[in-house]
Image (cartoon, rainbow, N blue to C red):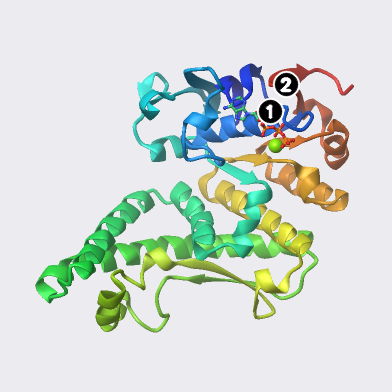
Amino acid sequence: MPLQRISINNLRNLGSANLNPSSRLNFIYGANGSGKTSVLEAIYLLGSGRSFRSHKIKPLIKHDSASLTLYAEHTSNNSIHKIGLERSGANNASRTKVDGRVVNSASSLASLLPTLMIDAHSFSLIEGSPKERRSFLDWLVFHVKHGFHDAWKGYSKALKQRNSLLRRGRIEGFEIRPWELEMCDKAHQLEAMRLECFKYLKQNLEAVISDFVPLEGVSFELYKGWDRDKTLEQQLDLGRERDYKLGYTWYGSQKADLKIKVSGHAADQALSRGQQKLLVCALKIAIGKTYSELSGRQCIYLVDDLPAELDSGNQKRLASWLNVIGAQVFVTAIELESLSLAWKETERDKIAMFHVKHGNVEQIKQEP
Ligand SMILES: Nc1ncnc2c1ncn2[C@@H]1O[C@H](COP(=O)(O)OP(=O)(O)OP(=O)(O)O)[C@@H](O)[C@H]1O
Ligand SMILES: [Mg+2]
């Protein structure tokens, strides 16, 4: 589902930019502060309705402008789809349209344009809380299992009700039990979907790691959110008094984690910063590959400031894996030369180049 046309208006320092990207590889280069990450931010916004840099709308809108607008065309099932997005500073108003029809939920937008980001923040996958790794796995589950979103919504609602009863000391069976039963029902659906996706992801991870990361003993395990030898029902029963004292539910699907170990030790303790970067790249490649195998579609990769994150040998390895996957890639760097070197093996007619200068984006025909 590559993007074919992108128009950006009044996002950060980008006034008006029009891009005709390649369906494979897109180099975006320019000096510090020129607007490269903002181009990626525009694409990410189109794919998810939100930014990876700010939860608020106001900082995204160009100073002295009332609103930002984005437009893109992409192909899916041999037809062209149009996405339009407007965000206004006044009342945080927002409007998103797909093929002329208003879309109200971020999840309907996200299912159209799955994007994967590789940037300096991606390293929180290793050193961050379980939430980071859970969101990482759930990105895949959401995109390939159609019941996941509804099951998660149902689970979250039941969990919220249970937590509210716990806080009010209402832990008598007749009040709390129906919500616990609902939680258990949805948790088992979520667990089954996560487990199936994890099985495929793990195979791809092992393959990518053996090629990409010179590391021995990396292992992956899915923690479902409660003890392996118990059902969630048993766990909630046993923990009700403790949960009452805590004022919230300790075990459940909201605690799931993709545990990453190196020879039995936590990865953030066992690996150097450079090794963690490689492992993160392997995770991102493997999940994109798994997505494409399970869905028959491609996601879009946004890679921000590649040379700052990887040495030249590893940039080449990442480039060759992204080439194998065949996804559409947008990659930024300060110098065009570093990108050209990393992607030396890529056919030149599959590459589009964009020079960003003081908020202007110019499509370059030939390497200068
Ligand atoms: N709302 C805004 N309106 C106008 N300019 C903004 C706004 N928000 C941020 N900027 C400016 O936009 C510019 C571009 O930022 P961006 O992060 O895209 O640059 P970059 O090319 O990725 O830089 P770097 O190489 O340092 O990562 C910055 O100079 C920033 O100060
Ligand atoms: Mg940047």
Report the number of discs.
2
The residue shown at (71%, 74%) is 270
Q: Is residue 1 visible?
A: no
Residue 359 lies in what quarter of the image?
Answer: top right
Q: Is residue 190 visible?
A: yes
Sooner in the amino-acid sequence: mark 1 or mark 2: 1
Cα separation, mark 1 vs mark 2, equals 7 Å
Image location (x, y in percent) of residue 1: 56, 33
Image location (x, y in percent) of residue 22: 70, 26
The residue shown at (67%, 46%) is 119
Image location (x, y in percent) of residue 266: 63, 74
State left or right for residue 161 relative to residue 328: left
Q: Amino acid at mark 2?
A: His
Give the camera-side residue of 72 and 45: 45
Q: Is residue 302 above or below residue 277?
A: above
**According to the image, label 1 marks what residue?**
35
**According to the image, label 2 marks what residue?**
358
Q: Is mark 1 within 8 Å of ligand 1?
A: yes
State left or right for residue 210 relative to residue 51: right
Give the crowd class for mark 2: few <14, some 14-19, many >=20 residues within 10 Å: some
* SS at badge 1: loop
Label at residue 231? none
Q: Is residue 103 above or below residue 254?
A: above
Give the crowd class for mark 1: few <14, some 14-19, many >=20 residues within 10 Å: many
Q: Is mark 2 within 8 Å of ligand 1?
A: no
Q: Quadrant of the C terminus?
A: top right
Contact between labelled residues 2 and 1, with CB atoms less than 8 Å apart:
yes
Q: Amino acid at mark 1?
A: Gly
Q: Is residue 286 above or below residue 96?
A: below
The residue shown at (53%, 55%) is 136
